[in-house]
Image (cartoon, rainbow, N blue to C red):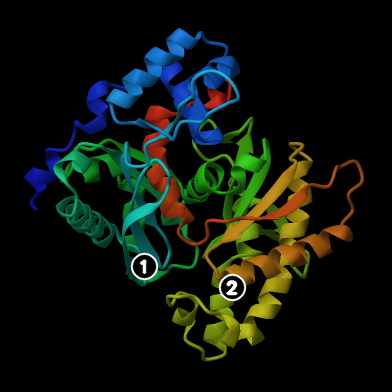
Amino acid sequence: MDGTEIKGLSGGVNQSGVRNYNERLVLSVLQRRGAMAGSDIARLVNLSPQTISIILRRLEGDGIVMRGDPSRGKVGKPSIPMRLNPDGVLSVGFKIGRRSADLVLTGFDGVVRQQMQEHYDYPFPEAVFSLLKRGLASFIDQMSPEERGRLCGIGIAAPFELWKWHDLIGHTAERFRSWKDIDFAEEVAKFSDLPVFVLNDGTAACHAEHLYGRGKEFRDYAFFFVSQFIGGGVVLNNTVFEGNQGNAGALGSMRTTGPQGESLQMIDVASIHLLEARLIEAGVDPKLLWRKPQHWSMLSRYVDPWMAQTAQELAKASLSVCSVIDFEAIVIDGAFPTEVRDDLVSRVRRYLVNQDARGLIEPRIEVGSIGEIARGIGAASAPIFSQFLLNANAGLTAY
């Protein structure tokens, strides 16, 4: 497939225009609560059954919602629940990471339909956008004409100001600074006219957890994602809060102190790049951390002390964020094996007990559920969220 063919996809589900408020309201209810009868939706959102019926018929006609199996009560005719059509809207997510880039195709349910991954020493722009172009063309080649028409956009998740990564020197640093002048939408427009949505990678992981993971259990929570550089996100009023410049929840930049009392950030004390450094110092290939499937058990000699330090820092940070917002929970996930994640969360809970919590209500420390691919899935959710769901932090009510 050449660039012209990719460029011909600008319509798709967008031909119907951005969904109106009431349609977004209904879709948000179905996304958060699952299949529901029209009468139940009407009572929940305080709209007339006739209005809801019209909306559901329109959404069903567009292929965005579908009928479930009839539910029979004690009296009257059976009600027919409506649910989101998992394939009613499709989206591409692209995560730009320190060691690898992930490209995924997902639907309304967040399930990955197609996936590509490429590893590198450093994510230079030319290589990154080449992967996106090749991967997008490959995805589209494997899609039916109807599926192509349901593509709603491309989400790109990247670290905030990634050109400032502090450990680069010399020619590598000079090449990497070219990211500062990169306009993501302009680069993608060279080979695709699908709309582009750019967000912080930690925020993207938070979106994935909130829409498709455990986020439905909590109204307000902070989210930590431990990767090459730790990041995170903030959820308020059942919606991921991105902030005025899209950088809310930059939890990796939280202040902490080193062993000599020096001022540091969370990325300096609770990131996987520190574990990589331990391995390199010991003469162990750090690529073992990223090999699929991930197994870190043979590296426990190096992982255990790294995890002890990371857990202590996360315990302190968990209380710190609660001094600003009264979060009911702290959710922790990351780009590591599930057994490492579970052990890390258990350690954070133990360390939290010994923290000075005067004036604070201690939050629940909870395990995330999406894992390494969260940033790619969250990136793919951005076009869907922006065009089909409600943003409760933009003055709208979440249900």
Q: Which residue is disc 2 drawn over?
A: 274
Q: Which residue is located at x 29 percent, y 39 percent?
A: 153
Label 2, label 1: how many angstroms apart (C-alpha)?
A: 17 Å
Compared across the picture, whether 164 is left or right of 140 comes to right
- Circles 2 and 1: CB atoms closer than 8 Å: no
Compared with 119, 224 (above or below) is: above
What's the amino acid at mark 1? Tyr
Q: Which residue is mark 1?
A: 122
Q: Earlier in the sequence, mark 2 or mark 1?
A: 1
Q: Which element carries disc 1, helix, strand or loop?
A: loop
Residue visible at 67% across and 35% down? 219
Q: Nearer the viewer, residue 326 or 261?
A: 326
In which quadrant will I find the C terminus? Answer: top right
Residue 43, given in percent of the width and then of the height, sits at: 59, 15
Q: State whether residue 262 appears in this view.
A: no
Residue type at mark 2 is: Leu
Q: Residues within 10 Å of mark 2 (few under 14, many from 20)?
A: some
Q: Residue 274 location, x and y as percent?
A: 59, 73
Residue at 7%, 44% in the rendered image: 4
Q: Nearer the viewer, residue 276 or 298?
A: 298
Front-lying residue, 305 or 27: 27
Farthest residue in the bottom direction? 283
- Seen in the picture, residue 198 relative to 133 is either above or below; the reply is above
Q: Position of residue 305 (x, y in %)?
A: 70, 78
- Residue 268 numbered tag: none
| Helix, strand or loop at mark 2 | helix
Q: Quadrant of residue 80?
A: top left
Query: Measuring 55% from the left and 69% from the top, which residue is drawn there?
Result: 336
